[in-house]
């Protein structure tokens, strides 16, 4: 199995989940506490960047996340072609 097919296999597993509670249980089983903390921090930073109004330093002070990570999340929101953060943020806007 190639790395790409393993990514797709994981993506399919994630999309098979029906509730936030199922997703949480799966992620807790799948990730170490440090990995889960890192993922949730990045997601929180993406939401804060999307909301706007805060500098990287302000986000760092509020979250404890490094400015390097904040910059990486910002780059993926703005510039990278994957559009993963953007797609989920838009979907969540539509659902609320």
Image: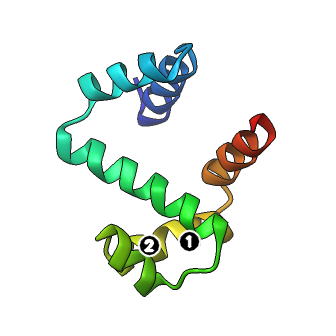
Residue, disc 1: 74
Tell which residue pokes out farthest to the left in this image.
33
Secondary structure, mark 2, is helix
Whether residue 80 sits left or right of residue 27 in the image: it is right
The quadrant of the picture occupied by the N terminus is: top left
Identify the residue at image location x=47%, y=82%.
56
- The residue tagged 2 is 70
The type of colouring in the image is: rainbow
Residue 2 in the image, given as x and y percentages of width and height: 42, 30
Point 53% across, 17% down: residue = 19
Q: Where does the image place residue 54, in percent across and percent down from the top left?
A: 55, 80
For residue 9, which numbered disc appears in the image?
Answer: none
Q: Nearer the viewer, residue 55 or 39?
A: 55
The reply to whether residue 73 is in sight is: yes
Q: In the image, what residue occupies the spot 81% across and 40% down?
A: 94
Kindly check if marks 1 and 2 are in contact, taking CB atoms under 8 A apart as contact.
yes
| Rendered view: 78 above or below 56 | above
Report the side of 41 relative to 52 (left or right). left
Q: Position of residue 43 (x, y in %)?
A: 48, 52
In the rendered image, the vertical position of residue 94 relative to residue 6, given as above or below: below
Give the Cα distance between marks 1 and 2.
6 Å
* Placement of 30 over or under 44, stated as above or below: above
Rate crowding at label 1 as few (under 14), some (14 to 19) or many (20 or more) other CA atoms within 10 Å. Answer: some
Q: Nearer the viewer, residue 31 or 95?
A: 95
Question: How would you rate the neighbour count of disc 2 (Cα within 10 Å): few for under 14, some for 14-19, many for 20 or more?
Answer: many
Task: Report the residue at 63% width, 80% height from top.
Answer: 53
């Amino acid at each position: 199995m190639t790395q790409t097919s393993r990514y797709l296999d994981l993506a399919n597993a994630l999309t098979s989940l029906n509730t936030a509670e199922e997703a949480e249980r799966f992620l807790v089983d799948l990730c170490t506490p440090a990995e889960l903390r890192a993922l949730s921090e990045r997601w929180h930073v993406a939401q804060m960047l999307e909301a706007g109004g805060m500098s990287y330093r302000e986000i760092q002070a509020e979250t404890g996340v490094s400015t390097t990570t904040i910059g990486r999340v910002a780059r993926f929101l703005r510039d990278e072609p994957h559009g993963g953060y953007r797609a989920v943020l838009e979907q969540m806007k539509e659902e609320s």
